């Protein structure tokens, strides 16, 4: 995985217009100020890793990108999250279209308790696809993209919950890909997996980053170092440092970042 | 062993024995009740004298009231020539149960889906206990309400010939079934992991699509079990049908006709019956039938729910 050696030198923001631009984002859970003036850019077709100790707000930032925080009561947000130059916190944002474009996989694989096929076909179906042929094509394409097709093509009608955890997480990715998003949010996608499965999901993420913008939240610093192009370090609701992964891990500018990545706290 | 730990272990023993005893008493009680009911119904199979009036074929097959007349099903246990056909009662029970379930299950499930998926939490905290309180209304009150108030309105609404019929009794019965089905179905829906809802919402599904296509199927085993429990309650419920059914033992499947249920028959006639008579033993036989009905429904229901759970979780191999 030579992913970390891409574009060395220049700060990444100078190269391309960001896919997601977070501007002065503040978020409160009730009276708790969880995010403080966060500014961060996410580049298209790259993997951006959010790292930081528990409770630092990295997952919260991630969940603003598809507005999943809206589900939590008492959440208040100020600032902007621009995706393709459109502020998704604008009143007129179509949440259904937003979530179709910005998909998410979770810490624990959460396939629905229905068949493999129905899991993948779920997204297209709720977005109005009824043609059987088209659904079958989408299911095959999505399962191929996560390297599940060869294992599961004869077991499409078996229950998804009977799969191994790794397969379940891959299935959740396939389920996302079937709605043809362009951003993939991964909230500690390997935390429920063993090391071998983790390595394989990482490989898959690198593979997918050719076509998708990926943001991954991780507790695992080796994981961030292995697969991401850009790393952002959060602490207590603030973005302390963001830069190319190689720079963050070899030559961090912020003292706290250095202490965290060298394991002095976390 | 130190004295304190000795007295400790003694009190532990006493408590344990007490708990075992209480469990044993309730189980033995149940078994004795069933043995008693079974024993009292036995003459229907063994005594030649009783079988002359009420053998199984007389109970379940059509009989001619007078020699040469057309064969009919008739429950007239106290006429000059007693007739013990249970068919009118079985039909009545099934008819009222069907109306009750048709009324109660959609209502209870819609309410459960609303409270678990759509209601704001303050409303949920109100609605759930209030519906559960419905279960605490004595069925005699429910029966009284059906008999005096509801029957009139139902008759006017549908323009029916009979004031007391399977529709009004069925609805009243349904009101008793609603809280049973609602509580269990709501629990089943609430027990669906939040991660399923998140997964669905994150794919761009609306709350309604999520509820209908993800939460409901995931909770289906529990919901089915809730319906079975409601069915059992409807079959066994006595007071409401006794009061609101009209108690006419006619074999008609029409919901607009009055009827008489198995349970109401026992309640109405057991007090007057001559001990040891054919009528007496047939009433106990009805009790056995009711017991077997509910037992088999629960058993089959549980079997089905278990298989469904295994299927959903992918462990059926």
Image (cartoon, coloured by chain):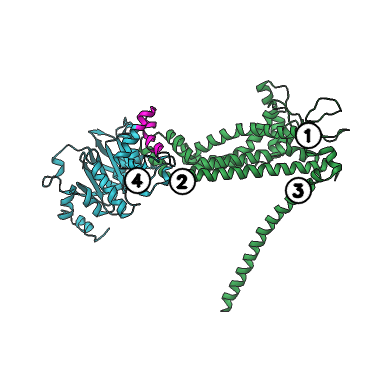
Chain colours: A cyan, B green
Q: Nearer the viewer, residue B163 or B234?
A: B234
Q: Nearer the viewer, residue A113 or B241?
A: A113
What segment is highlighted magenta in the picture? Answer: A116-136
The chain ID associated with circle 2 is: B
* Residue B21 locus on image (x, y percent): 67, 62
The quarter of the displayed image where residue A81 is located = top left
The chain ID associated with circle 4 is: A
Label 1, residues with CA under 10 Å away: few <14, some 14-19, many ≥20:
many
| Residue receiving disc 3 | B38
Q: Residue at x 54, y 36 (%)?
A: B109
Q: Is residue A123 visible?
A: yes
Badges 3 and 2, same chain: yes
Label 2, residues with CA under 10 Å away: few <14, some 14-19, many ≥20:
some
Which disc is residue B224 wearing? none
State how far apart marks 2 and 1 are (Cα). Answer: 47 Å
State how far apart marks 3 and 4 are (Cα). Answer: 56 Å
State how far apart marks 2 and 4 are (Cα). Answer: 16 Å
Q: In the rendered view, tell whether residue B42 sits above or below residue A178.
A: below
User: What predominant SS class does the magenta segment belong to?
Assistant: helix
Q: Is residue A152 left or right of residue B33?
A: left
Q: Nearer the viewer, residue A75 or B292?
A: B292
Which disc is residue B85 wearing? 1
């Amino acid at each position: 995985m030579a992913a970390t050696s891409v574009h060395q030198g220049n700060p990444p923001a100078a190269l391309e217009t960001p896919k997601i631009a977070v501007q002065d984002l503040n978020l409160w859970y009730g009276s708790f100020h969880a995010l403080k003036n966060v500014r961060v850019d996410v580049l298209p077709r790259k993997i951006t890793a959010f790292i930081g100790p528990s409770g630092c707000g990295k997952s919260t930032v991630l969940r603003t990108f598809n507005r999943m925080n809206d589900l939590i009561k008492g959440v208040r947000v100020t600032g902007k999250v621009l995706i393709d130059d459109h502020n998704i916190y604008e009143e007129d944002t179509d949440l259904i279209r937003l979530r179709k474009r910005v998909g998410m996989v979770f810490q624990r694989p959460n396939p629905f308790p229905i068949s493999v096929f129905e899991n993948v076909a779920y997204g297209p179906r709720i977005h109005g696809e009824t043609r059987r042929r088209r659904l079958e094509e989408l299911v095959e394409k999505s399962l191929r993209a996560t390297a599940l097709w060869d294992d599961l093509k004869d077991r499409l009608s078996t229950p998804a919950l009977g799969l191994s955890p790794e397969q379940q997480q891959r299935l959740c990715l396939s389920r996302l890909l079937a709605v043809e998003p362009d951003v993939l949010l991964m909230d500690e996608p390997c935390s429920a997996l063993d090391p071998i499965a983790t390595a394989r999901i990482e490989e898959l993420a690198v593979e997918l980053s050719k076509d998708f913008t990926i943001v991954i939240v991780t507790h695992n610093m080796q994981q961030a170092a292995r697969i991401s192009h850009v790393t952002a370090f959060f602490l207590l609701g603030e973005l302390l440092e963001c830069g190319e992964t190689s720079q963050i891990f070899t030559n961090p500018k912020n003292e706290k970042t250095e202490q965290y990545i060298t394991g002095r706290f976390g | 062993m130190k004295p304190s730990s000795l007295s400790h272990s003694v009190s532990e023993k006493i408590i344990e024995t007490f708990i075992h005893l209480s469990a044993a008493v309730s189980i033995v009680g149940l078994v004795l009740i069933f043995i008693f009911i079974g024993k009292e119904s036995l003459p229907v199979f063994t005594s030649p004298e009783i079988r002359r009036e009420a053998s199984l074929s007389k109970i379940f097959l059509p009989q001619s009231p007078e020699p040469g007349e057309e064969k009919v099903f008739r429950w007239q246990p106290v006429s000059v020539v007693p007739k013990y056909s249970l068919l009118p009662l079985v039909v009545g029970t099934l008819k009222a149960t069907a109306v009750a379930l048709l009324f109660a299950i959609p209502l209870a499930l819609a309410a459960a889906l609303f409270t678990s998926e759509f209601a704001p939490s303050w409303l949920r905290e109100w609605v759930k206990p209030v519906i559960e309180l419905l279960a605490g209304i004595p069925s005699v009150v429910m029966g009284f309400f059906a008999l005096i108030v509801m029957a009139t309105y139902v008759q006017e609404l549908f323009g029916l010939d009979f004031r007391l019929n399977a529709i009004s009794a069925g609805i009243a019965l349904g009101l008793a079934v609603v809280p049973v089905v609602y509580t269990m179905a709501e629990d089943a829906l609430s027990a669906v992991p939040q991660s399923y809802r998140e997964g669905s919402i994150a794919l761009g599904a609306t709350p309604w699509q999520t509820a209908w296509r993800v939460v409901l199927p995931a909770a289906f085993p529990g919901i089915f079990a809730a319906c079975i429990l409601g069915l059992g309650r409807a079959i066994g419920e006595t007071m409401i049908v006794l009061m609101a059914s009209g108690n006419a033992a006619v074999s008609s499947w029409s919901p607009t006709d009055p009827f008489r249920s198995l349970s109401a028959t026992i309640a109405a006639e057991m007090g007057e019956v001559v001990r040891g008579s054919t009528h007496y033993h047939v009433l106990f036989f009805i009790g056995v039938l009711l017991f077997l009905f509910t037992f088999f429904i629960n058993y089959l229901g549980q079997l089905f729910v278990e298989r469904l759970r295994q299927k959903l979780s992918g462990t059926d191999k």
